């Protein structure tokens, strides 16, 4: 089926930090909304559709997205939607609408402030409310369970995991928006105490407040707004069972399925931006995607260096697109995840001309 | 550029009640199974699932789509979660329709739900924010001043709200799925019910319900196949949605511009020049009875200030010239997250001729309408018996 | 639908109709810069709105952006302590944990100098005498109880001025 050409033409993100104590969500978003529009050289009147991703449970407030829309200034009335998913899925919704021809330019934003609450407890509210929720199993414990399964199956080693952490921090040194960066020694990392065994602290993404904005444009509009648009050549997402016992935690079936449907395998990619909040999840994802050794994985430092929940997947898309638009890459894949232990995964294949 | 015709070939809903004894998954699955059965399909026939509800605080589950993936047969498929405000059931159906229209999937299952009994809705909606103006009176207290403004502007007499409530509750008696079945309701009993948020009486407000709604949407081939088997599909003729800020200086909250423009857009797509003449029935989102005359004006069924006259003249009765809320509406069943989709589904049921005792004879074109937030989010579709 | 029936040995078992699981999550909210400035002034019993640089409308309480223009509102404007009732409702539901004697009146009050109404309580007047256009003034908590919250205003009460003409507030009514 011939799809309409849609591209990421602009991207902006906040300087991610542990807690933006002074700014509310509107104030956090306004500057990067302006920056993203300016990056495309347009005003908000050119935007045909706005879609956002955020979570009430992070904000601790029902319908929290309603107030945040004021950061865009939706007047005169706009076509707008919201997902309680990572902003990467908001891109998906926009991309679908753009296929119908009514939308030429779409603006996507996502934000997450994890600082108001206790993110590990908050994420436990995602679990089956009858069997798992009442136990308050937290997100790190579930990831540790997955890591243990992978280690025991021989899928990877603790050294492999530490190497992912070190590489991410190293890569983030060239990313001014990252929360964590620096040269770290694998041996030093391994010498640290266990956090939630077998996970060390360095295996886990930091707790982050942050936001991101992406501008999408279709066909001629994309060429008009960007010298080298990052064309979406395929985008797909798949979900797995919620019951952890019903899944093989050492692999990611849904990632592989989404990759097939997004046409990832057609040609090799130069860059992969993977939304892996835990080191072992990056290893699982690399394998599920069959990435070669020479693929640059998470040149931004990835979620391990800044993990604003609900925006971290969207940022992977933005980072991948940025590398295409700057000419550093010709083909890239961006990935986003949702749910405990990589339950749901989205893949987006991007290409330059 | 693809733009497939979209048909609704399966519709299912729960019997909406104050408390549904099923689990959250059970409630959702009940509506979905009924939609599949109606579509003569099985879970394996479905290509993608689009689920909506809002807010997550109602059931105490964050991103419930994750936990519901298994129950909705979504494993290995795309599962998309929509979260807009009170219009969410409508927005959810629109995302599902887009997936089919864009040619991405042939058969999409869309579901919306709410189990208000799982937690305290009033509580979930009024988490006290230390630095925001204090909430003094809940949703009714928020909308009552807008209704007062409407009455001031239009000069509508007091009994209009009563007439709407009476009509919707009588319609509900014909709908086995409706939550409220008040067989002995009368004009006097509505009038004499307690004035909760003056000018809103108790009997002019919606209940809190548990319930779910589901639809199966297919492309033209699927619609034609259903028609060939004698199961008339509803064809989507137009879809639109609009948003505007909650409050701003000079905002018209009685007749919001977002709603007007949304209606104009959806009529244009459906080739409707004169909505009053061209539309056979309307299922609109009326959580407080006075919103019926307000929305009649907002949706261009009459000149501004005259919606109440349509009510008074009986135009919106089930046997009237333009029946409104044939199912009994939100006033008779309100599983919030599903309420928008129930409006869309009722419109489709009408043009499919499957609305049973609340069927409008010869309904060919129907409008489904949902709104949310502070009258600021709108979602609409026009469905028809005739393939566009 | 498939009928699911219980195995024989479970037929007599009492079904579990519901389980109660309590969830407690604590949050530390951030009001943001604009609201902080406003709330700090409230502790001085001053109501300070913010003007949008684009549409020049004065917002109170400020939320950080002009909702129609999406730009920061930074220019501060001191507002009156009095305002006009734009619309209202009489509440007969014990909503505020029975803190209020019902019926009571919640009103949209457009403070003098502001372009948007705030919601607050009307007291010190019989509920059935409250009407659109009525002029009211803020009643503050005792000085030692005032904090950075709009609840430092206990309620509004009639200030004795003649009603404002409908034309003066109809844009928000
Ligand atoms: Zn402005």
Image (cartoon, coloured by chain):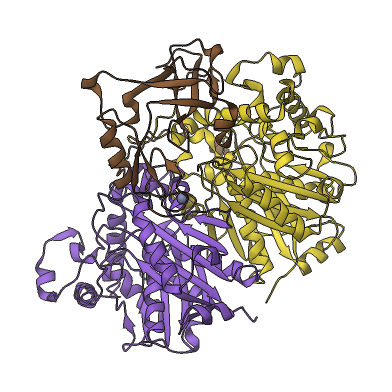
Is residue C12 among the parts visible in the rendering?
Answer: no
- Total marks shown come to 0
Q: Position of residue A143 (x, y in %)?
A: 30, 60
Chain drawn purple in the picture: A
Rendered image quadrant of residue A212? bottom left
Up-down: is A210 above or below B275?
Answer: below
Foreground residue among A291 and B3: B3
Q: Residue furthest right?
A: B362
Q: In this view, does A270 lie to the left or right of A118?
A: right
Where is residue A285? Give x, y as percent.
Answer: 37, 74
Residue occupying image coordinates x 52% and y 45% = B54
Q: What residue is shown at x 66% (from left), y 26% (from top)? A: B152
Where residue B169 appears, as percent x and y from the top left, is: 73, 27
Q: The brown chain is which one?
A: C
> Can residue A294 be seen by looking at this rendering?
yes
* Chain B representation colour: yellow
Foreground residue among A320 and B134: B134
Please identify the quarter of the rendering in which residue C87 is found.
top right
Q: Compared with residue A89, is residue B291 higher up or lower down, i.e. above or below?
A: above
- Residue closest to the eye, C157 or A328: C157
Which quarter of the figure is the N terminus of chain B placed in? bottom right
Give the residue at x 40% y 64%.
A34
Give coordinates of residue A141: x percent, y percent: 28, 55
Q: Is residue A66 above or below residue B228?
A: above
**A314 relative position to C105: left or right:** left
The quadrant of the rendering that contains the C terminus of chain B is bottom right
Position of A236 with respect to B107 (left or right) is left
- In the image, is A206 to the left or to the right of A347? left
């Amino acid at each position: 089926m011939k799809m309409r050409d849609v591209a990421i033409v602009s991207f902006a993100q906040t300087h991610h930090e542990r807690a933006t104590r002074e700014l509310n969500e509107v104030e956090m978003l306004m500057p990067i909304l302006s920056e993203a529009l300016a990056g495309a050289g347009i005003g908000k009147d050119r935007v045909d559709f706005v879609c956002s991703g955020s979570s009430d449970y992070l904000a601790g407030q029902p319908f929290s997205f309603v107030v945040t829309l004021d950061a865009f200034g939706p007047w005169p009335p706009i076509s707008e939607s919201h997902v309680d998913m990572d902003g990467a899925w908001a891109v998906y919704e926009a991309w679908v609408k753009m296929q119908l021809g009514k939308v030429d330019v779409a603006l996507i934003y996502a934000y997450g402030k994890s600082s108001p609450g206790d993110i590990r407890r908050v994420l436990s509210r995602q679990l089956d409310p009858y069997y798992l929720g009442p136990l308050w199993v937290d997100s790190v414990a579930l990831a540790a369970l997955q890591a243990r399964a992978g280690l025991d199956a021989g899928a990877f080693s603790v050294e492999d995991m530490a190497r992912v952490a070190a590489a991410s921090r190293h890569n983030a040194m060239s990313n001014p928006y990252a929360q964590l960066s620096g040269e770290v020694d694998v041996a030093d990392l391994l010498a640290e105490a266990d956090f939630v065994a077998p996970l060390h602290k360095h295996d886990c993404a930091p707790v982050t407040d942050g936001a991101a904005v992406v501008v999408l444009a279709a066909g001629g509009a994309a060429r008009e707004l960007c010298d080298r648009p990052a064309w979406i050549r395929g985008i797909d997402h798949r979900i797995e069972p919620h019951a952890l016992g019903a899944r093989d935690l050492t692999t990611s079936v849904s990632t592989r399925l989404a990759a097939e449907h997004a046409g990832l395998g057609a040609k090799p990619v130069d860059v992969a931006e993977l939304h892996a909040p835990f080191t072992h999840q990056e290893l699982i994802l690399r394998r599920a995607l069959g990435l070669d050794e020479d693929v640059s994985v998470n040149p931004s430092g990835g979620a391990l260096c800044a993990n604003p929940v609900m925006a971290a997947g969207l940022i992977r898309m933005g980072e991948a697109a940025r590398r295409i638009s700057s000419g550093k890459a010709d083909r890239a894949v961006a990935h986003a995840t949702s749910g405990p232990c990589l339950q749901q995964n989205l893949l987006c294949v991007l290409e330059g001309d | 550029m693809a733009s497939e015709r979209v048909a609704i070939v399966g519709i299912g809903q729960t019997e909406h009640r104050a408390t549904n004894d099923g689990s959250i998954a059970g409630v959702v699955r009940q509506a979905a199974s009924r939609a599949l059965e109606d579509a003569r399909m099985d879970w394996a026939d479905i290509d993608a699932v689009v689920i909506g509800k809002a807010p997550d605080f109602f059931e105490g589950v964050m991103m419930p789509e994750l936990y519901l993936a298994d129950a909705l047969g979504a494993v290995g498929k795309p599962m998309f979660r929509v979260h807009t405000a009170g219009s969410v059931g409508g927005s959810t159906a629109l995302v599902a329709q887009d997936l089919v229209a864009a040619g991405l999937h042939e058969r999409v299952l869309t579901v919306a739900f709410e189990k208000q009994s799982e937690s305290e809705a009033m509580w979930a909606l009024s988490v006290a924010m230390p630095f925001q103006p204090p909430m003094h009176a809940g949703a009714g207290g928020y909308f009552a001043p807008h209704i007062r403004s409407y009455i001031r502007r239009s000069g509508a007499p007091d009994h209009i709200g009563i007439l709407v409530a009476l009509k919707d509750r009588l319609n509900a008696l014909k709908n086995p799925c409706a939550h409220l079945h008040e067989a002995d309701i009368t004009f006097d009993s509505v009038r004499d019910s307690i004035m909760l948020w003056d000018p809103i009486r108790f009997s002019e407000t919606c209940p809190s319900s548990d319930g779910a709604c589901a639809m199966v949407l297919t492309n033209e081939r699927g619609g034609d196949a259903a028609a060939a088997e004698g199961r008339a599909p509803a064809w989507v003729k137009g879809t639109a949605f609009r948003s505007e800020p909650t409050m701003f200086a000079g905002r018209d909250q009685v007749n919001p511009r977002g709603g007007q423009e949304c209606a104009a857009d959806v009529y244009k797509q459906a080739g409707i020049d004169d909505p009053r003449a061209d539309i056979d029935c309307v299922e609109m989102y009326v959580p407080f009875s006075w919103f019926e005359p307000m929305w009649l004006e907002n949706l261009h069924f009459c000149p501004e200030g005259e919606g109440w006259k349509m009510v008074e003249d009986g135009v919106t009765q089930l046997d009237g010239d333009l029946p409104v809320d044939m199912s009994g509406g939100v006033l008779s069943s309100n599983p919030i997250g599903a309420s928008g989709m129930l409006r869309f589904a009722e419109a489709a049921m009408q043009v499919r001729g499957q609305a049973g005792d609340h069927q409008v004879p010869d309904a060919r074109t129907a409008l489904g309408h949902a709104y949310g937030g502070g009258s600021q989010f709108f979602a609409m579709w026009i469905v028809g018996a005739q393939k566009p | 639908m498939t009928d699911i029936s219980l195995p024989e040995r479970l037929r007599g078992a009492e079904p579990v109709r519901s389980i109660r699981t309590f969830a407690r999550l604590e949050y530390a909210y951030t009001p943001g810069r604009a609201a902080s400035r406003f709330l700090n002034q409230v502790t001085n019993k001053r109501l300070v709105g913010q003007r949008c640089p684009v549409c020049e409308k004065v917002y109170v309480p400020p939320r950080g952006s002009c909702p129609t223009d999406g730009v920061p509102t930074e220019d501060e404007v001191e507002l009156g302590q009095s305002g006009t009732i734009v619309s209202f409702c009489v509440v007969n539901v014990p909503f505020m944990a029975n803190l209020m004697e019902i019926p009571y009146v919640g009103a949209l009050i457009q403070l003098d100098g502001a372009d948007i109404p705030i919601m607050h309580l009307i007291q010190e007047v019989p509920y059935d005498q409250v009407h659109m256009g009525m002029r009211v003034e803020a009643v503050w908590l005792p000085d030692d109880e005032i904090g950075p919250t709009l609840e430092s205003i206990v309620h509004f009460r009639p200030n004795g001025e003649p009603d404002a003409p409908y034309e003066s507030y109809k844009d928000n009514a």
